[in-house]
Amino acid sequence: MENTPKWYDAHLQDYRKVAYIKSKEEYDELYNRSINDIDRFWSEQADKYLTFEKRWDSVLKYDFNTADIEWFGGGILNASYNCLDKHVDKLKNKVAYYWEGDNPAESKVVTYLELYNEVNKFAAVLLANGVKKGDRVIIYLPMIVELPVAMLACARIGAVHGVIFGGFSAESIASRIQDCGAKIVVTVDGGFRAGKPLPLKKNVDEALTRCPEVTKVIVFKHAGMDLKLDPSKEIWWHEAMADPNLPSYVKPEPMSSEDPLFILYTSGSTGKPKGVLHTHAGYLLHAAMTNRLVFDLKDDETFWCTADIGWITGHSYTVYGPLINGFTSVLFEGVPNYPGWDRYWEIVAKRKVDKFYTAPTVIRSLAREGAGWVEKHDLSSLKLLGTVGEPINPEAWRWYYHYVGRDWCPIVDTWWQTETGGQMITPLPAVAPIKPGSCSFPFFGIDPVILDPDTGEEVKYPGQEGALFIRKPWPGMARTVFGDHQRFIDTYFSRIPGMYFTGDGAKQDEDGYFWIAGRIDDVINVSGHRLGTAEVESALVLHPDVAEAAVVGFPHPIKGQGIYAFVTLNQGVAKTDELRKGLVNLVRQQIGPIATPDAIQWADALPKTRSGKIMRRLLRKISAGQIDDLGDTTTIADPSVVDTLVKGRVVLNA
Ligand code: WT7
């Protein structure tokens, strides 16, 4: 790769003619204002992107020690109003969503007026079923139009939605319902994945055996499954919506800027997944503004973010960001390889997608199947590409750039997190050349700094790696962990007091570009999805034959990281493949298919320090096959344990 350029800028001249932000100078000027003139800068932005029923009294008040953050305090607005009512007159016939089914023969075009009508009706259904402002509503739906409808209906009446990704198990659904105290669940008979039906309602049924508090379940009929509903608490979506007594308009509930909008569960290094809470005004502004500026989206362009709405990426860039802006998006129910490995490109060509946003893991899996699938389709509508979820490796980057982006489209590698609400560090297409693997520069209002996580000192610039912190609040940041503000403080604001701790390692190069190295805590990133090693371990030790388990992430060619479990069995238990399968199933049942371990190694003992701490660093090296580089093993209580583990390493054929 000697001749590989250090950066790419084929698009720069063209983008400098059309982009909203046309140069590094313009970016610098705006960036400085966004950090140093917070009140004025953010007032202007809020005026541009949002409609308030009552204007705010103060732009920002905060205390990072108590993690109290208030943006646009005193303001009153409603998310659903900002997504729909605000532009329904002007945009009524504009497409909000091109829905593409798992089955390519199924698709739907939904206009802003149609979406508005559905949301109003479903808001009325929620009200009729006793949902009140502040109540939590769990939504467990596949990628169908009813998912944004349900979310916006909640927002309209001031209820707090908690969307659960369809790949989570009954057990995960139950613990989330219990954690947020939801009394109502919106779900579906079933979804589809690569032509096969997925019985989602069955997962809800199983979950609800442990959630007696749930008194209502609304079921959308999507897969045509012949279900018998329990008349004491379950109703069909279509029947509820057909009630002639329902009002066709529900007045948007006036919400304070800091009233909760949604909860989204995400994994951390310890304990159960946290219910990350986002509020109205700041989150909406951050989602809308980044959606427009990072993708440089114009009003007549079509946007496609391939992420499932069950993750923050879908919340911000399939629902709130695009709708607040009045953009047209694609909503795709299926998977990239069904019916063929060109499904994405078929949809891009069919809907003439202008800007396309996906994850490195997807790019790697598509690249592995060969460029022929891409070349079959006319992708000339594409003007910009994006990635998110994990660092992108140079090979995947170049493949994406060359075959999908015609050696011209800029690739915005957007670094952010569930907790940040929106994109944080990311290229803008006309600002500077793009370096593959770097997320470039901070977005407006984002004040990142790289510190030694132990001393709090800034690392040597350029080049030295440290932990990424954010110095100041930004509008889209999470406000708390639902029901556990102390955990919010402990997780994000205590590592270095007064700063937000991201959990990521990073460095800055000599040109000031940021490079994210990945998590420095016990979080693994599997195909762009976050999992706590502790969660997987807790699932494994539930098995009566398991004495102890240690889980680490290891480099995986497609997923980025895979899940590697070291399992110590109880005395006398036979180490069989059947038991291995049983453990894999147990994890799938406890967390969901996304947590399926890639490798389980039987470990008669685990390497521990003399004080009994499992030495994960060593386990990571062993799982990655870096056995010549085990580092310092002198603190280990019984060094022979390591030799045995090295010999027993499970080699995977990915
Ligand atoms: C973690 C957050 C934000 C939506 C997707 C994941 C990693 C995310 C990048 C990127 C390198 C990235 C980080 C981060 N990550 N984007 N462009 N380059 N790493 O959200 O599940 O909250 O995970 O994903 O490690 O902390 P999430």
Image: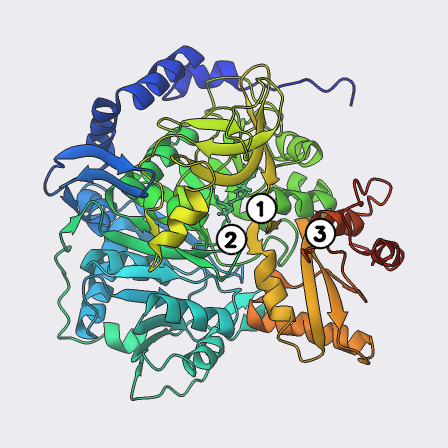
Marks 3 and 1, the one that precedes in the sequence: 1
Secondary structure of the residue carrying tag 3 is: loop
Q: Nearer the viewer, residue 576 or 125?
A: 576
Query: Whole-Å distance between the Cαs marked 1 and 2?
Result: 8 Å
The residue type indicated by label 3 comes to Met
The reply to whether the C-beta atoms of the residues labelled 3 and 1 are less than 8 Å apart is no
- Compared to residue 156, the image places residue 513 above or below, namely above
Marks 3 and 2, the one that precedes in the sequence: 2
Q: Nearer the viewer, residue 507 or 603?
A: 603
Q: Position of residue 328 (x, y in %)?
A: 36, 43
Q: Nearer the viewer, residue 408 or 479?
A: 479
Total tally of numbered discs in the picture: 3
The image's mark for residue 654 is: none
Residue 477, picture quadrant: top left
Q: Quadrant of the N terminus?
A: top right
Q: Which residue is mark 3?
A: 615
The reply to whether the C-beta atoms of the residues labelled 1 and 2 are less than 8 Å apart is yes
- Local packing at callout 1 (Cα closer than 10 Å; few below 14, some 14-19, many 20+) is some
Q: Which residue is mark 1?
A: 521
Q: Is residue 381 visible?
A: no
Q: Which residue is mark 2?
A: 268
- Compared to residue 318, the image places residue 431 above or below, namely above
Secondary structure of the residue carrying tag 2 is: loop
Mark 2, ligand 1, within 8 Å: the answer is no
